[in-house]
Image (cartoon, rainbow, N blue to C red):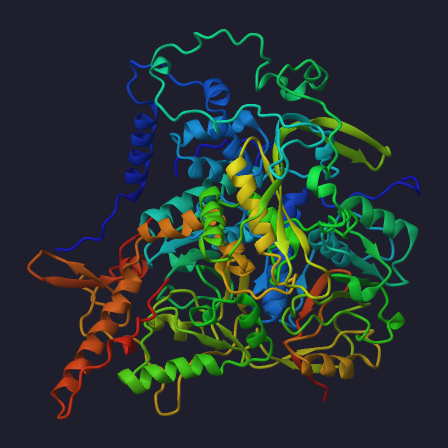
Amino acid sequence: MRADMIPLAFRDPVHDSQSAFRRLLRALSRPGTPVSLPGPAEAPEPMGGPLAAIALTLADADCPIWLDPALSTERVRRYLHFHTNAPQLADPRAAAIALIGDAGWLPGLNGFHPGDAPYPDRSTTLILQLPALTGGSTVRLSGPGIETTTSLAPLGLPNWFWPAWHENAARYPLGVDIFLTDDRAVVGLPRSTNVEVP
Amino acid sequence: MITSIKGGEAAIAASHRLLAKRRRGDPAIANLSVGQIREQLSLAVDRVMSEGSLYDPELAALAIKQAEGDLVEAIYLLRAFRTTLTRFGHAEPIDTAAMIVRRRIATTHKDVPGGQLLGPTYDYTHRMLDIALMGEAGHENLSDLTGEREAEDELENTAADADAVASALRRDCGVLARTDLVEPALSEAHGKVADITRAPVMFPSRRDERLQSLARGDEGFLMGLCYSTMRGYGRSHPFIAELRYGDATVVLTVPELDISVGIGAVRLTECQTVHLTSRDDSVPPRYTRGYGLVLGHGERKAISMAMLDRTLRSAELGETVAYPAQDDEFVLSHCDSVAASGLVQHLKLPHYVDFQAELQLLSQMRADYAKRRAEPGFKTADPATITETLGGD
Amino acid sequence: MGIDLAFDDHGVYSFAYLDEMTKRMIRRAILKAVAVPGYQVPFGSREMPLPPGWGTGGLQVTASLLGREDMLKVIDQGADDTTNAISIRRFFARVAGVATTERTGEATVIQTRHRIPERALTEDQIIVFQQPQPEPLRRFIPHEVVARKLHAFAQYGVMYVRLYEDISRLGHVAMSSDYPVIVNGRYLASPSPIPKFDNPKLHRSRALALFGAGRERRIHAIPPFTDVKSLDFVDHPFTVQHFESCCSLCGAQDSYLDEILLDDGGRRAFVCSDTAYCAEQRGERTKS
């Protein structure tokens, strides 16, 4: 493959994105439970399959996106522009979706839009790619979508993350929603989820 | 023995066949062609294109045929088709100053720059049935006039139209050019234009959202509201500063190629009204504007739209919002014929589950009533306090 | 519906009717709705080949969900065989080629108008409600701007006042269907015009519930295992309808019953509104 060629997206855009959406819906309706999410055949580094699948499924000309420094490569930008036509913004607060390749770059969650009191849906959704969804320190989740409690141990979250999430949940119904991904699955973390750090 | 009622599938199929039969009517009478509708029922076609918000005379004529002449149904057919179309770009704002004008009047002055052009109108016809049309029409030789519909997509031909003038009309002429008396038109560079077909209108609404909603709104509903403002629910009597009907070019800019191309012409009716406004103390008394624009020839609708555009600016202009026609939520939420017709007619759907629930509520209320009545010292309730129960939808 | 469009021509119409950009917009709205249970997310509702008020909201939500592997069930008034249910089921069979069923247990997506099936739903199912009016406050507050403010600050006193007026005048709340609920302890929401008999089924249900209001352009959701509380007062707890009779066909005593008029002399009988449940109770094999 030539270096300047844009890798292919979904083989079957209609059905692959339908399937990906149902997996995202399942992940967000069952917070903390990993759902496998096959990606497109290829995606430019450092985009993992699930992160690419989410961008291809949700982003378009009506859905501005923001890329963190890790994803701000020419190849990723061209790939997303070609396949989604989503406006790529410099201001994370103005983006509907923020794609984050390396959570270590992030100063916190306050740079994103939490929505407005009459319109809490006008918030940013974060897609946060991690080395793995298991193997980190364990937290306990509860809230809508969770029968009693469930535990989650993602690897590679910065230290500020869970305290920041606690603040995020405390301003409910405002707040951001997050999808955590690794190289094969996605975990939903809607703002309605409460987290206990043991 | 009770059996649940089945057979809905067969009933629907049979109903569709009955429709097809009625649509065709007496087979001894010639089948109506879509072309005949397009050419000879052009005002119906125009209304369907305008409220269906899709400029396609052929499909609008098809919709009218399919709906047996029910225009609201035809509008809905066209909308349901339109919504599936892929958007490949956004046209530039239409320049109505460059319109090939077929009719143009200004009522504020006897004569205005550019002149008055009566054009085709029923305004000064005598509404007497023309028995001659019962026979094969077309006795009169009209070949000296270029056809109303012919020049549709051949822009180069229009210059030769005997009934059209490509005069150098400006957007604002006549009284509208009196910048000392009339508020300036808003500049075109006003941020991103809303698209009500893709994002819902949020209240308080913006003017672009209102104009789009009104352009698709039901003619009868808008006209009735407009009438109400003239009769006593709005104290409004504006002047029509400019009413034009003619052809305008649609221009598309292709960003990749950085060129602008004319992709065709649409026939439009544009109306601008002026309204004496003195309530806002921050500026001297002046005329404020109302604007109406519809696809095809629809003057009744364009005038209603312009007047409602102005009444819906009441809040912006510091006027008290007291009448239905000034209330954007009231007007915009109820002016769409597809939505209104859908909800009104959904009452034909089965509601037996809710009815059952309400019957139970009724029997409980009746039992309570009987109990209260039996109590000593019972007094009949004031009828005003009897509330409507809150049933289903 | 008198419409005959060439759905099989995929050059003209997309899978499940809606174009992909519209589906994406609706999918984004659905995800927001799930993240904020009970909050009504505005969305750019499209014209559909069925009229607004006849289930276009549910139709658009279902069209955005459906895939080739789905098994769709459509009910109206609890029944699979009402004309509107048939019409919608046929629409999806035609535009998405999706398999359909009448059996509640088999379905992956259930679109409904006015009922929740009697049989408990599972976590592998999504129930889509057709909703004519998603705003429970609209009955007293016609203005969206005002209602939205009340939602923003969770000021639902006006609703309680209204219910309490009923209680003080009538001794009970005069609402038998579309009985308002508080979702996840925060948003006042409409459960759609289901009889209040069905309200308890929404509370901590295992299935995701999505509500689509096409004409009003709103989507809201109740995720699985979410608290759904029907409004009431300590001294006047919420109650559901109870039937004196049982189903004349299957004998069920726990289901919502439809009244059947046997003659004009007032003879009546009752049958299950949920036709699939009734058939199941009778051990009948229903159509797949």
Identity of the residue furthest to the left in this view: C265
Residue B151 falls left or right of residue B284:
left
Count the labels in the image: 0
Res C244 quadrant in image: bottom left
Residue B13 in view:
yes
Position above or below: B362 against B198: below
Determine the residue positioned at 50% across, 19% down: B39
Q: Where is residue A1 in the image (x, y as percent from the top left)?
A: 89, 40
* Residue B262 image offset from top left, x and y in percent: 75, 27
Horizontal and vertical percent for residue B67?
40, 32
Horizontally, residue B359 falls left or right of residue B105, namely left
Q: Which of B124 and A59 is in front in this view?
A: B124
Q: Looking at the picture, does residue C197 appear above or below residue A62?
A: below
Q: In which quarter of the image is the C terminus of chain B?
A: bottom left
Task: Say left or right for C18 vs C85.
Answer: right
Q: Which residue is drawn at 75% across and 55% down?
A: A55
- Regarding residue C67, the answer to whether it shows in the image is no
Residue B143: image quadrant is top right
Which residue occupies the foreground of this view, C216 or C184?
C216
In the image, what residue occupies the spot 32% across and 39% down? Answer: B12
Q: Between A81 and C40, which is closer to the camera in this rendering?
A: C40
Residue furthest to the front in view is: B110
Closer to us: B12 or C179: C179
Q: What x and y, as percent, mark residue A5?
A: 88, 40
Residue drawn at the location 57% of the way across and 36% of the way down: C13
Quadrant containing the N terminus of chain B is: bottom left
